[in-house]
Amino acid sequence: MRHSVIIVFFIACVSWWTPVRGQTPIAQRQVQRAIVLLNRGKYAEAEKILRQVVSKHPSYHEARYELALALSLQQKFQEALITCLPLCDTSLPKDQQRDHYYHLLGNLYAQQDDTTRADSVYQLGLKRFPTSARLHVELAIRQAIRGDLEEALESIESAISGDPTYPLSYYWGARFYRASTERIWALFYAEIFLNLRPNSPKADEMSTLWYNLLREVIEEFDQQGRIVLSREIRGNAEDTKRPFPEVYAEVLTTAARSLRFFRDFELPLASIDTLFREFLMQWESQGYAKIYPNILIERQQQLWKAGLLEPYVFVLAQHGKPMQFEQYAKQNRRQLRRLEQWISHNRLVITRENYVSRYRW
């Protein structure tokens, strides 16, 4: 738990600064300079600047937040907590508060193993900012630590529906769903995270998770003759549309049956590419692309038509089978460069209209 909290601190360090009314341009520039120092790991220098700003401008809440963050990054947790507490005073007008104030305060309590107060702060923050993805994610982490997996999954879905652009919702969602009966969402959320944050330190973990889940699914297919990615969902009798997870697994099963997998005791990356190609052909030919619009499947279709599905699959699964990826990379440098160029012009843009979520299916 301690490691996860510290990681969250580093993530929070990626500039929450925005111009604030009533603050002098000099103070705003000083805070911006301090944020640059924080991102460079120069915490003591940033702290010195921020103390001067807070001393001159006590009501400059963003400066106080950054100071609390600088203190926490130096493991001055008690002082950071005292600095952060006034920011979460609910007597303050809502427009003077931000969800990341409650996020930091809750993390500071969690860092001191005061999980009761940490949960209380996250809940308090959610009352003020009910769509805050970061607060829902933190609550989900605490729930998972306590063994409440179903509650954690509900919190993850609330995070995604509240703000579909927040990458950590998909990272933790993939981890939690991996241990659930709804593994289909682990597969999708890991792929979304890898598209949103391909160079993140967490990308290798998501790549390994994505590959291992597919390997496990194909091994089960060998034994059972079908692919199961979620528990049976009983829909409304009046609803003629079948649940998406059921249809997805059915088409994936059909695709797997039409293939002759080459075995090397584990699933080769080339076999995943072949499986996906067959899946996409059948998904499109059966009209499911229109019935079940899904931005990730659409992205795979675009890559397939551009002749880039193979390098895409190899990049997604590169940490699951690193030796195979290294060999592929040596022989297919041009394809990987083409993929890089394609992605730079076709970033995965998640919106409230197209996001992928269990809540939407």
Image: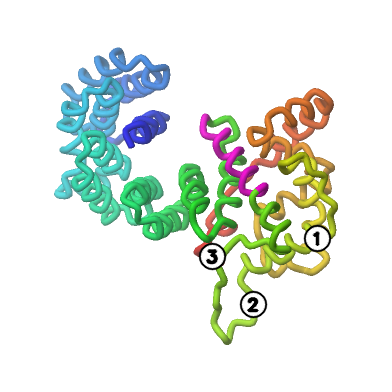
* Quadrant in which residue 41 is drawn: top left
Please name the amino acid that badge 1 sits on: Arg
Q: Residue at x 73, y 30 (%)?
A: 325
Q: Is residue 357 above or below residue 317?
A: below
Secondary structure of the residue carrying tag 3 is helix
Decide whether residue 154 is among the magenta residues.
no
Q: Residue at label 1?
A: 257
Position of residue 333 measured from the top left corner of the image (x, y, whole percent): 80, 25
Q: How crowded is mark 3: few (under 14 residues within 10 Å), some or many (20 or more)?
A: few
Residue closer to the observer: 100 or 97:
100
Q: Is residue 44 above or below residue 151?
A: above
Please name the amino acid that badge 3 sits on: Arg
* Quadrant in which residue 58 is drawn: top left
Q: Is residue 337 above or below residue 249?
A: above
Q: Residue at label 3?
A: 360
- Callouts 2 and 1 close, C-beta under 8 Å: no
Q: Which quadrant would the N terminus be assigned to in this image?
A: top left
The magenta span reads 201-215
Which of marks 1 and 3 precedes in the sequence?
1
Decide whether residue 203 is among the magenta residues.
yes
State the separation of the CA atoms marked 3 and 1. Answer: 29 Å
Which of marks 3 and 2 precedes in the sequence?
2
Structure colour scheme: rainbow
Q: Which mark is residue 283?
A: none
Q: In this view, does 280 lie above or below 117?
A: below
Position of residue 237 measured from the top left corner of the image (x, y, whole percent): 57, 86
Q: Which quadrant would the C terminus be assigned to in this image?
A: bottom right
Secondary structure of the residue carrying tag 2 is loop
Q: Residue at label 2?
A: 241
Which of marks 1 and 2 precedes in the sequence?
2
